[in-house]
Amino acid sequence: MRVKELMSTTVTCVRPETSIEQVAKQMKQENIGSIPVCNDRGEALGIITDRDIVVRSVSTGDSPKAAKDIMTKNLVSADPNMDTHEAALLMAKYQIRRLPVLENNKIVGILAMADVARKSIYVDEAGDALSAISKQSTMN
């Protein structure tokens, strides 16, 4: 099965200068845990998770002001035609629960661990990937 068959295609982006407060409000309004950061052409520049807001903004006391200040810039992504198994392996390797799907560097979807787990043929894979994701990270 291909990523494009499981991914969510309703994806909104924020711009690099969007305030962190606005990013958080948009996440709450859309009931999502991550949001891509894109330029005017819709090209992916990074991603912000709800955890990024807490760890890189709220807890620092520095109060970064914009999305670009706390986004993850080294974006791990999938291709829409990538095999779902490969995507699950990427999630496990990089300890991420949501994988942006890019085509020509533009966001066309998001594949979440929950999307993988919902397909009965991937339940074991999702469990294995989630187990790897949940291990304590050695990255700072």
Image (cartoon, grey):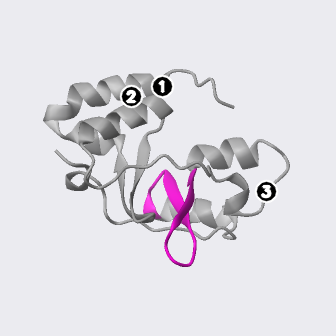
**Residue 117 lies in quadrant:** top left
Q: CA distance from mark 1 to mark 3?
A: 27 Å
Q: Are marks 1 and 3 in contact (CB under 8 Å)?
A: no
Residue name at image x 62 percent, y 52 percent? 73
Look at the picture and state if 47 lies above or below 19.
Answer: above
| Numbered disc 1: secondary structure | helix
What segment is highlighted magenta in the picture?
30-48
Q: Which residue is mark 3?
A: 64
Residue name at image x 80 percent, y 43 percent? 60
Give the image location of residue 138, x and y in percent.
Answer: 63, 23
Q: CA distance from mark 3 to mark 2?
A: 30 Å
Q: Which residue is mark 2?
A: 130
Mark 3 is on which residue type? Pro
Upstream in sequence: badge 3 or badge 2: 3
Q: Which one is nearer the viewer's eye here, 88 or 104?
A: 104
Q: Which mark identifies residue 134?
A: 1
Q: CA distance from mark 1 to mark 2?
A: 6 Å
Look at the picture and state if 21 lies above or below 100.
Answer: below
Give the image location of residue 76, x and y in percent.
Answer: 48, 46
Q: Quadrant of the N terminus?
A: top left
Mark 1 is on which residue type? Ser
Look at the picture and state if 81 lies above or below 14.
Answer: above
Residue at the extreme front of the image, as rendered? 104
Q: Residues within 10 Å of mark 3 (few under 14, many from 20)?
A: some
Look at the picture and state if 123 lies above or below 76.
Answer: above
Q: Residues within 10 Å of mark 1 (few under 14, many from 20)?
A: few
Q: Are marks 1 and 2 in contact (CB under 8 Å)?
A: yes
Give the image location of residue 42, x and y in percent.
Answer: 49, 73
Mark 2 is on which residue type? Leu
